[in-house]
Image (tube, rainbow, N blue to C red):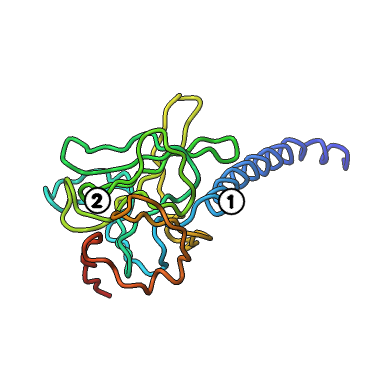
Amino acid sequence: MKGKMIIALLPVALIVFVVLIILAIIAACFGNEEMIIRSSFTLPFNTTDYVITSPFGTREDPISSEIKTHNGVDVVPHGTTDILAVGDGVVVSSDIDSQGAEYVIIEHNFGGTKYRTGYWHLKENSRCVKVGDNVKQGQQIGIMGSTGYSTGPHLHLFLQEYDSSKKSFEYKDPINIIKNKILPESVNLYNYDTNSYQQSNPFEDRFKPIDPNNRYELPTLTP
C-alpha cells in the first residue's frame, strides 16, 4: 500500500519539480537583467534629484490626446541640463528626426547582450558626439532640450535589448536605470567654447552655476 502511494504521488512530485525549475529560470533571467542594469548603467545626468513626467507604456499623448505607446521614460533632472551616456558604448546615431528632435543613440555590450539607449529632444546644436565615437559612462552627449515633438524641456530616454531570435532590438522599460539612482563615478562635460571635454566630479558640478550661454534655463519643478 505504501509503495503504491509513493508511485501515485510521483507525477505530482514531478509536476512540482518542473514548476520550481521554471520559476527558478524566470527568477534567474529577471535577476540577471536587473544585475546587468544595476552594474552597467548609471543615471543620464549628474544628480539624483529629478521628476519623471511620463512613464514607459501606454499613455494619453500630451499633444494629440490620443492613446499611444510611449517607448521610453520622460524625465526632468533638477540642477543640471547636461545629458550623459549611461554606459560605455559606441554612438550608432546622432541626428535630427523627422519632427525636428535632436537625438543620440548609443549601443552597449554587457554580459554578451547588446543594448541601445536613446536620448531625445536634445537642445538644438548641442550634440557633441558623432556616429562611430566610443563614449564612456558619464561622458556628456548633449544638453537637455525641447526640440521636435515636445511640450517642454525634458529627456526622453529609451532602452532596447537585442533579441537574437527576432534579430532585432526590442524596447524595454528603462525605469530601472532611473530609479536605481546610481551616479557615474566621473563626469566628462563638454566645453562648447573650446569644443573639448574636461573631466569633473559629479557631486561638485551639481552646485556650479550654469553657463547661460551654453545651458538651458532650468525648468521650474513642481513637487
Q: Is residue 125 above or below residue 208?
A: above
Give the quarter of the image for residue 45. Answer: bottom left
Q: Nearer the viewer, residue 19 or 84?
A: 84
Which quarter of the rendering shows the N terminus?
A: top right
Distance of label 2 from label 1 (alpha carbons): 28 Å
Residue at point 71% right, 41% down?
A: 17
- Left or right placement of residue 22 versus residue 14 in this view: left
Residue, far left: 64
Residue 179 locus on image (x, y percent)? 44, 61
Give the quarter of the image for residue 79. Answer: bottom left
Residue 121 locus on image (x, y percent)? 24, 49
Q: Which residue is denoted by mark 2 in the rendering?
A: 59
Q: Secondary structure at mark 2?
A: strand
Q: Is residue 152 above or below residue 40?
A: below
- Left or right placement of residue 144 versus residue 27 in this view: left
How many marks overall? 2
Q: Is residue 163 above or below residue 74?
A: above
- Left or right placement of residue 218 versus residue 117 in this view: left
What amino acid type should be assigned to the residue bearing mark 1?
Answer: Met
Q: Which residue is denoted by mark 1 in the rendering?
A: 35
State the mark number for residue 148. Answer: none
- Going from N to C along the chain, the mark reached first, 2 or 1, is 1
- Disc 2 crowd rating (10 Å Cα; few below 14, some 14-19, many 20+) is some
Which quarter of the rendering shows the C terminus?
A: bottom left
Q: Nearer the viewer, residue 154 or 196?
A: 196
- Left or right placement of residue 123 versus residue 114 in this view: left
Q: Nearer the viewer, residue 45 or 171?
A: 45
What amino acid type should be assigned to the residue bearing mark 2?
Answer: Arg
Residue 42 locus on image (x, y percent)? 48, 55
Q: Is residue 152 above or below residue 88?
A: below
Q: Secondary structure at mark 1?
A: helix
